[in-house]
Image (spheres, rainbow, N blue to C red):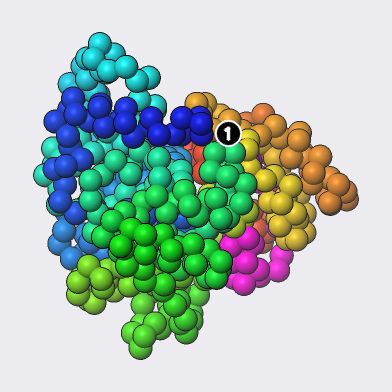
Amino acid sequence: MTDSKHCNLYLKRLQCFLDLINNPEKQVPHYIHITGTSGKGSVALMLSSILKSSGKKTGTLTSPSPDTLQSRIEINGIKISKSEFTKIVKEDIKPALEKYQKVFPHNLPSFYEIITAIALKYFADEKLKWVVLEVGCGGRYDSTNIIPKKDLAIITNIGLDHTEILGKTKVKIAKEKLGIVKKGNTLFTTEEDIKILDIMKKHCVKEKAKIKIINTKHKTLKTNTFIYKNKKYTLPVLGKHQIKNAILSIESAKYLKIPSKYILQGLKNVKLPMRFEIISKKPLIILDSAHNEDKIKSTVKTYNSLVKKNDLHLLISFSKGKDIKKMVEILSTLNPKTIAITKYQKNNLKQPENPRKISKIFKKILPKIQTKTFSTPKKALKWTRERSSDKNTILITGSTYLAGEIVKNLKLFI
């Protein structure tokens, strides 16, 4: 999605394109469709892991990708190979695009629409019965909303992100995300705002859909173990917000009639890379892909609840179009010892914010903290590592793309 004035054309042109490759979207019988401001990627991976544990060969499309495009498209946790990806592009996508230009009056499908088409073709070719789709942006006009039916629609929550496309208020954003809920669907959500829930309920009445509002009340035993409805669950990831995502996944799986033992196993085995992921202990290096205000709040809460108070070094990058000031204000409460600000490289989808602009905001709030800008994440990481001891903490956050680039260079410094 790039032009909010002509959104109604997006699904039309994608449908025309899918018609040319034998409608793979119609060949998958079971879809789970997930949107929300925060947590949708985690819920998608949790449900995929649960489905896999129950013996179902499951496809997953997530967004964005921290490194290669192939990492967006998985079957049972294994990403599509470069050769399989290339084969679909050469044998299906490229010929269809050439024919599309001659036959249809619409503009060519967007980059994300093409990625969705590749994923759907791959899933259809593999004869999958279950696919979990994470919405890229919004819901109503997102390319994933091309699917003809779904077993379950999930909206994790509603916050302010992608406001330049979806609208400046939570009400407007909610209406866009509710676009994935169609006639006869069932909606699951952990949203708590009464005003937003009222909008959801009215939409469901209009669409003759059902709504299930999940109460995430639980008892935490350890940092990654909790009791929910008298049953103990273990997660290999950190953060109270991930327990909330897990409970949403539990209730969704129950609705799909997946036995409890597979839900337990699926959550225990789930992998959520770059979600407050500890990738080194000396020093403690936390790799986190939080990239909007809500996610940054969760990151700070998790940090304050789990990490011992020692010297913290921040390494950050943000994308353009985000509420930089609010994210900086939240991160500043951590009172870091140093702040390294950089920009991710080689990305045609999201442009990085100018590090100097971010630095100016930090310096207004934390004028005495050593803050420095860098042209590459590699240089920022090297500088940060040189100023941190093995007893310190390095928190890398602000962008999925930054996290992906840091992973490539991390082995040089730990």
Q: As drawn, is 237 to the left or to the right of 24?
A: right
- Name the image quarter holding residue 165: top right
Identity of the residue furthest to the left in this view:
127
Residue where numbered disc 1 is placed = 344
Magenta highlight range: 297-319
Residue drawn at point x = 36 percent, y = 85 percent: 229
In the image, 127: left or right of 36? left
Residue 338 location (% of width, % of height): 76, 49
Q: Nearer the viewer, residue 67 or 57?
A: 57
Would residue 3 be seen by someone viewing this image from the given angle? Answer: yes
Q: Is residue 229 magenta?
A: no
Q: Position of residue 157 (x, y in %)?
A: 49, 61
> Which is more toward the observer, 39 or 76?
39
Quadrant housing residue 56: bottom left
Q: Amino acid at mark 1?
A: Tyr
4 or 302: which is nearer to us? 4
**Does residue 311 appear left or right of residue 4 in this picture?**
right
Residue 401 appears at what percent x and percent y? 52, 39
Dot 1: within a 10 Å radius of its alpha carbon, few (fewer than 14), some, or many (20 or more) residues? many
Q: Can residue 236 be seen here? A: no
The foreground one among 4 and 336 is 4
Q: Secondary structure at mark 1?
A: loop
Answer whether residue 300 is magenta in the image. yes
Image height of 337 relative to 213, above or below: above
Q: Residue furthest right?
A: 368
Residue drawn at x 59%, y 70% is 306
Q: Please, which residue is most extreme toward the front here?
A: 206
Q: Up-down: is 189 above or below 137? A: below
